[in-house]
Image (cartoon, rainbow, N blue to C red):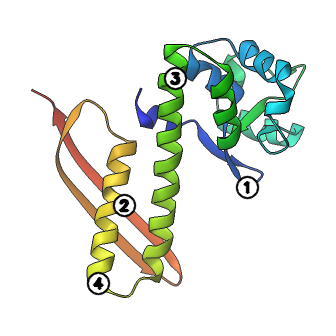
Amino acid sequence: MELQAIENKIFTIQGKQVILDSDVAELYNVETKRINEAVKNNPGKFPEGYIITLTDDEMNFLRSKISTLKNTGRGKHAKYNAKCFSEKGLYMLATILKSPKATETTIAIIETFAKVRELSRTISQLSEQSDKERQKSMIKKSGELISDILSDDSQTVGTETTIEFNFSVLKVKHTVKKKPKE
């Protein structure tokens, strides 16, 4: 499973990085109702903050940004608002779902969250770093993390990272040049 496929499903809601229940179901190759049944049957494993039920406003916002809500049966007049799993909620879900696919998916999700968190930390530290050699090292590390998240079956033939720092705004651009593996 590619980390990029998972990374594309992570978004921030109520200040937390989460994955929509329908996206979790897609990753685990099960129906959304099976994911929600697992949660309903194991309420003690999901304390507050592990699962977030979206408000009407959040649902409308996501509907305007993500086509998933329109295409999965969660149409304009859905009976229930979607749920989102925080990283902790996904870990708990992994203890319930037992299959080789569930194990593979859980490992990929954990790796993606860890890499996104590490990239975030590295970029935050980069703006505070004044030592040019240390900055260069951090830029390289950021590039490697981005490459890991966006990796596929292509061979990397070169990378380029540029950084702009302008009035407390940090802009990082990372370009990865790839070609198909031979």
Crowd class of label 4 (few under 14; some 14 to 19; many from 20; radius 10 Å): few
Q: Nearer the viewer, residue 139 or 37?
A: 37
Q: CA distance from mark 3 to mark 1?
A: 27 Å
Point 16% across, 36% down: residue: 179
Residue 122 visible? The answer is yes
* Mark 4, secondary structure of its residue: helix
* Mark 2, secondary structure of its residue: helix
Q: Earlier in the sequence, mark 1 or mark 4?
A: 1
Q: Would you name the residue on which mark 1 appears?
A: 15
> Where residue 113 sits: x, y (%)?
53, 45
Q: Nearer the viewer, mark 3 or mark 1?
A: 3
In the rendered structure, find residue 103 and report the number of the disc placed on it: 3
Residue type marked 3: Thr
Q: Earlier in the sequence, mark 3 or mark 1?
A: 1
Q: Residue furthest left?
A: 182
Compared to residue 176, the image places residue 152 above or below, namely: above
> Where residue 177 sits: x, y (%)?
21, 46
Q: Earlier in the sequence, mark 4 or mark 2?
A: 4
Point 73% across, 55% down: residue: 15
Q: CA distance from mark 2 to mark 3?
A: 27 Å
The N terminus: image quadrant: top left
Residue type marked 4: Lys
Q: CA distance from mark 4 to mark 3?
A: 42 Å
Q: Earlier in the sequence, mark 4 or mark 3?
A: 3
* Mark 1, secondary structure of its residue: loop
Q: CA distance from mark 1 to mark 2?
A: 23 Å
Question: Is 59 on the left-hand or right-hand side of 65?
Answer: right
Q: Nearer the viewer, residue 32 or 57?
A: 32
Q: Would you name the residue on which mark 4 appears?
A: 132
Compared to residue 77, the image places residue 64 above or below, namely: below
